[in-house]
Image (tube, rainbow, N blue to C red):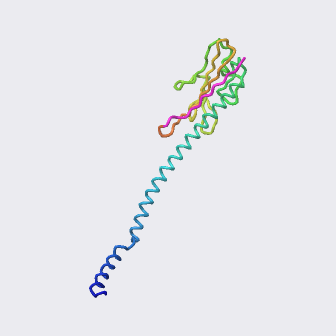
Amino acid sequence: MTTARDIAVKSRISKNVDRGEHGSTLIETVIAMFLLSVGVLGVMGALSVAITQNWNMGDRATRTTEYAQDKMEQLLALGFNDSASNTATFPTASTGGTGLGGVMAANATVGGVTSGSPITGYVDYVNSAGSFQTTSTGALYIRQWRISTNATGTLKTVTVVTRALISSHGANAPSTTLVSIKSL
């Protein structure tokens, strides 16, 4: 049998339980949403920077390969003993250049592909529009080439190196090296 005292105790217990089971207030919800938004925006900003950097480096790497292939095709189109064609311009001029090194002695090398001081006649530059130029002013890429002969002087090894002149956020600037052989 339930007494008045039991009813009073049950009433107090149910009031205490009701007070502890209240949901979150509107202010708590707004604060939680604000904190979540700040976190998501921070991650989105970092993701945006990473995507842009990856795209830039990928684009530059692709262009170094494309420009190296263009130069290699231009050089391989010359005659084996060509010594006058100017390959530092496009289209190739018939005079004013070094061609494919002309008649070369066995085990000889002309041109160079090391970074630092490019060798005149064996270097050109590409600007942001993809146009070839003879000076580094405004260039985004440098192309250098070297021609070497074998021990018999009947094969020429053509090496083309294209480098991006601008790196992205401390990463190494992309470069491409192509090597091909031309026979007499």
Instruction: Write the residue at 65% across / 20% down.
Output: 157
**157 or 168: which is nearer to us?**
157
In this rendering, is residue 143 above or below 3?
A: above
Instruction: Write the residue at 61% across / 16% down.
Output: 109
Instruction: Write the residue at 65% across / 15% down.
Output: 150
Q: Main secondary structure of the magenta part?
A: strand
Q: Residue furthest front?
A: 1
Quarter location, residue 103: top right
Residue 166 is covered by the magenta coloring: no
User: In the image, 25: left or right of 151?
Assistant: left
The range drawn in magenta is 171-184
Q: Which image quadrant: the N terminus?
A: bottom left
In the image, residue 86 lies at what x, y percent? 67, 24
Q: Which image quadrant: the C terminus?
A: top right
User: In the image, 2: left or right of 181?
Assistant: left
Quarter location, residue 16: bottom left
Quarter location, residue 9: bottom left
Residue 181 is covered by the magenta coloring: yes
**109 or 6: which is nearer to us?**
6
In the image, residue 89 lies at what x, y percent? 66, 28
In this rendering, is residue 151 above or below 19?
A: above
In this rendering, is residue 29 above or below 131?
A: below
In the image, residue 88 lies at what x, y percent? 64, 27
In the image, residue 2 lies at what x, y percent? 31, 86
